[in-house]
């Protein structure tokens, strides 16, 4: 169990983590979701004591991580697959970690076997692909049979087989009663593994709920209709109990009415329809609303800096919610 | 216990946990770290070859091609001369000591190390102990081998120079101590700066460049400063001849040299413990 209470981290002027309070419970995979730069990695560093919080506390099973008797038996973490000395062999890398916690030497070779790196155990990790590095990092995290596991963007650099492997591994670890806390900037990744979600944007807590709750609350169907008579259609839709909002000069975004109803309504009133398309706009919009102020890095679009910033935020948000849209559409 | 579970089924069960992960484990870990990277072998190997090689070349050359008679030579500090490769060897020891800690930062390994053992004092002091012990052993080997080879050249020339000559043992043991001290100073600088090139540059600057720069100061300033510089103070421990007032003497000099290292290590240790990794 990880408990953060008012966790805040300031780097100079920049507030990376802003008063986060959350609990990560054992027995399930908890997704840690947010756009790039939202403070996910910083939060994980604070949990591990790599960085000291500016204020607030975070504990592992009620204690600060540095007070835990055998850190590797308590927490296994993979924050950065490149955080290894490339000149050291995979075996010696794991051995020097195992020794710090008095773990049996035999587990080193077995952990390499578990992640499929036995054949390169004696090879220096400098030559490893990112995927092999991730596997080595996961082996290190599992060495101490920890109660809590933390992975920061673990599927980065993994091939499809590797992605499936780590998803199943995380689910198995959670099913065994462990606490599994995994970050991602991709909603689709969370959808496949997590049961619970902690969503942050610009360092602040945006949502703390189950994946299903997040989707239910945010996946109202919106229909986009393009028609030369948008004002007339809007009035008809409103009369039918739907809501219609203009979307440009000749289009509407309609909610609370189905696609069939809208099509029939237009046909019955002889309104020409040039486009009738479903969009999970509200989930997308919800995430945009949630994170539009929290997208750290806006790409400047020449000539229209203000809109460029919004468009970029929307792009990342759309990326994040695309998985949920798929799920919502099922 | 969740040892023999499905996810980690292939792993040997962990023994029941008692006590806590501490200094002993950290020490074994640091020993594994230092022996498992090639830079250790390269730096210590080249320190050995360079120091012994230069000492041997210089002493062989002067013993066989110099004009001085045995009687004249007997007044010189031939023990110190037989160790003079240390002037370059210390710089390679600086590289060894600095890299032992800065490589943790340059590779990012520090984050993994401190996740396995978040009690930073245990990591820092065990690493320092391993680095010091390795540098001391290698330093003594370098110093003794240099002296044993070089003194044979002088004995062939008719000078009575052995380990039992006055102060010879102090100087030869001192040569190894001085090399270890150089590594410790650089380790401290590395912990302060967290940057390989910066730590090596400042280490070389302190031990080598500073000694040269002081020569450009007015003579009266030099007279006051010279003996306190790290190289001039520490160098006394591998000399057999001292001039009271001009230098600090073997052990006082080495003590002053060590203070530089202690200050660097203390500051480095403070930063290691308190600054974000």
Image (tube, coloured by chain):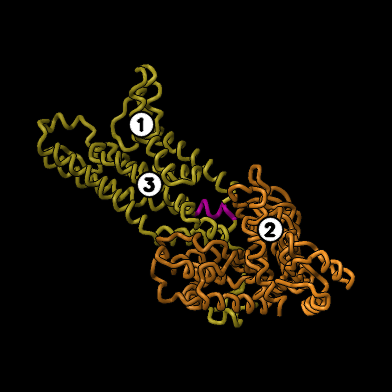
Q: Secondary structure at mark 1?
A: helix
Q: Is disc 1 on the same chain as disc 2?
A: no
Pointer 1 residue: B232
B29 in magenta? no
Q: Secondary structure at mark 2?
A: loop
**Do the CB atoms of the residues marked 1 and 3 lie less than 8 Å apart?**
no
**Of the pair B223 and A289, the residue shown nearer to us:** A289
Whether B173 is drawn above or below A229: the answer is above
Q: Position of residue A311 (x, y in %)?
A: 65, 56
Q: Colour of chain B?
A: yellow
Checking the image for residue B5, the label placed there is none
Pointer 3 residue: B95
Checking the image for residue A64, the label placed there is 2
Q: Position of residue A210 (x, y in %)?
A: 75, 71
Residue at coordinates 51% horizontally, 65% vertically from top-left?
A99
**Of the pair B199 and B248, the residue shown nearer to us:** B199
Q: Secondary structure at mark 3?
A: helix
């Amino acid at each position: 169990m990880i408990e953060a209470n008012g966790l805040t981290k300031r780097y100079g002027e920049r507030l990376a983590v802003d008063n986060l309070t959350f609990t990560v419970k054992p027995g399930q995979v908890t997704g840690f979701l947010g756009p790039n730069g939202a403070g996910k990695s910083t939060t994980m560093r604070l949990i591990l004591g790599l960085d000291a919080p500016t204020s607030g506390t975070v504990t592992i099973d009620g204690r600060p991580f540095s007070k835990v008797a055998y850190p590797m038996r308590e927490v296994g973490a993979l924050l950065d697959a490149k955080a290894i000395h490339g000149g050291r062999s995979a075996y010696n890398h794991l051995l020097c970690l195992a020794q710090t916690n008095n773990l049996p030497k035999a587990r080193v070779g077995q952990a390499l076997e578990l992640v499929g790196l036995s054949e390169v155990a004696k090879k220096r990790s400098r030559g490893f692909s990112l995927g092999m590095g991730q596997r080595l990092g996961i082996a290190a995290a599992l060495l101490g049979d920890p109660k809590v596991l933390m992975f920061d963007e673990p599927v980065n650099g993994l091939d499809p087989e590797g992605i499936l492997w780590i998803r199943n591994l995380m689910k198995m670890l959670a099913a065994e009663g462990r606490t599994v806390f995994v970050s991602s900037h991709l909603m689709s990744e969370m959808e496949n593994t997590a049961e619970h979600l902690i969503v942050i944007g610009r360092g602040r807590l945006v949502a703390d709920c189950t994946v299903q709750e997040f989707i239910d609350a945010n996946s109202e169907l919106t229909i986009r209709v393009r028609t030369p008579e948008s004002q007339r259609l809007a009035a008809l839709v409103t009369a039918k109990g739907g809501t219609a909002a203009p979307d440009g000069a000749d289009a509407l975004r309609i909610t609370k009415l189905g696609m069939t109803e809208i099509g029939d309504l237009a046909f019955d009133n002889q309104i020409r329809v040039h486009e009738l398309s479903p969009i999970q706009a509200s989930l997308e919009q919800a995430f945009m609303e949630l994170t539009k102020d929290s997208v750290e890095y806006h790409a400047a679009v020449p000539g229209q800096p203000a809109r460029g910033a919004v468009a970029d935020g929307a792009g990342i948000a759309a990326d994040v919610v695309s998985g949920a849209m798929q799920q919502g559409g099922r | 216990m969740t040892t023999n579970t499905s996810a980690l089924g292939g792993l040997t069960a962990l023994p029941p946990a008692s006590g806590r992960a501490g200094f002993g484990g950290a020490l074994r870990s640091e020993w594994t770290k230092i022996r498992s990277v090639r830079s250790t072998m390269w730096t210590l190997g080249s320190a050995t070859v360079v120091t012994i090689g230069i000492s041997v070349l210089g002493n062989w050359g002067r013993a066989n091609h110099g004009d001085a008679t045995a009687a004249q030579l007997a007044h010189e500090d031939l023990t110190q001369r037989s160790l003079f490769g240390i002037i370059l060897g210390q710089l390679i020891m600086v590289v060894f000591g600095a890299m032992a800690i800065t490589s943790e930062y340059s590779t990012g390994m520090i984050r993994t190390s401190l996740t396995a053992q978040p009690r930073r004092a245990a990591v820092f002091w065990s690493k320092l102990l391993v680095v010091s012990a390795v540098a001391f052993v290698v330093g003594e080997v370098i110093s003794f081998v240099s002296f044993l080879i070089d003194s044979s050249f002088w004995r062939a020339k008719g000078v009575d120079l052995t380990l039992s000559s006055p102060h010879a043992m102090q100087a030869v043991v001192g040569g190894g101590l001085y090399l270890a001290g150089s590594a410790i100073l650089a380790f401290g600088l590395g912990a302060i700066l967290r940057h390989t090139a910066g730590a090596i540059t400042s280490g070389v600057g302190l031990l080598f460049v500073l000694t040269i720069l002081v020569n450009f100061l007015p003579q009266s300033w030099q007279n006051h400063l010279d003996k306190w510089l790290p190289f001039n103070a520490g160098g006394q421990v591998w000399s057999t001849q001292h001039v009271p007032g001009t230098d600090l003497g073997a052990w006082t000099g080495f003590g002053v040299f060590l203070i530089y290292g202690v200050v660097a290590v203390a500051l480095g240790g403070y930063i290691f413990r308190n600054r974000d990794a």
